[in-house]
Image: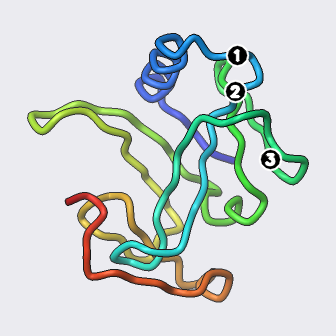
Amino acid sequence: MIDITPAAIREVTRFLKSQQHSPEVVFRLGVAPGGCSGLYYTMEFGPQSATEDQIYDRDGIKVAIEKSSVSYLNGLTLDYSEDLMGGGFRFKNPNATNSCGCGYSFYIESLSHNYKSETSETCLGE
């Protein structure tokens, strides 16, 4: 299960309205190998979910998570905040055993066997 803060919901809703989205569009959250800590978060708006996706409804937003990413995102809180450097989504993952200062790359020791590590010297936040 994931949690999306009211600020993040407002930002996703704002984006969807600006794109005049169709009802079939879902907000996809996932995990991919790479980044400075071994894994990084992915977000995109896409077509209706695949059959193996887990679908959550958060305040009218359909959130789709690939089956392979569910264990990495379990307990995740997605937030949105603005500061002097601009606005952005923030990921708070209680399962992460290591993360980079960029906030996008992370590692979970107990699940390390599921993805081949493809760490990079380049920080995703730079």
Q: Tell me the amino acid under the disc marked 2.
A: Val
Distance between mark 2 and mark 3 Cα atoms: 15 Å
Q: Are marks 1 and 2 in contact (CB under 8 Å)?
A: yes
Instruction: Report whether 97 appears left or right of 115.
Output: left
Residue 59 image point, x, y percent: 64, 19
Instruction: Using the image, determine if residue 17 lies above or below residue 49.
Output: above
In primary-sequence order, the first of circles 2 and 3 is: 2
Reading the image, the residue beneath label 3 is 54
- Cα separation, mark 3 vs mark 1, equals 20 Å
Q: Which quarter of the figure has residue 61? A: top right
Secondary-structure class at tag 1: loop
Q: Crowding at label 3, few (<14), some or many (≥20) Cα neighbours within 10 Å?
A: some
Question: Which residue is tagged 1?
Answer: 22
Residue at horizontal 65 percent and vertical 57 percent from the top:
74
Front in this rendered view, residue 53 or 73: 53
Whole-percent x and y of residue 95? 53, 67
* Residue 114 x, y percent position in the rendering: 68, 82
Mark 1 residue crowding within 10 angstroms, few (<14) / some (14–19) / many (20+):
few
Q: Which residue is mark 2?
A: 25
Compare residues 49 and 3 and report the one nearer the observer: 49
Pointer 2: residues within 10 angstroms few (<14), some, or many (20+)?
A: some
Q: Is residue 93 above or below residue 15?
A: below
Residue at image position (55%, 51%) is 76
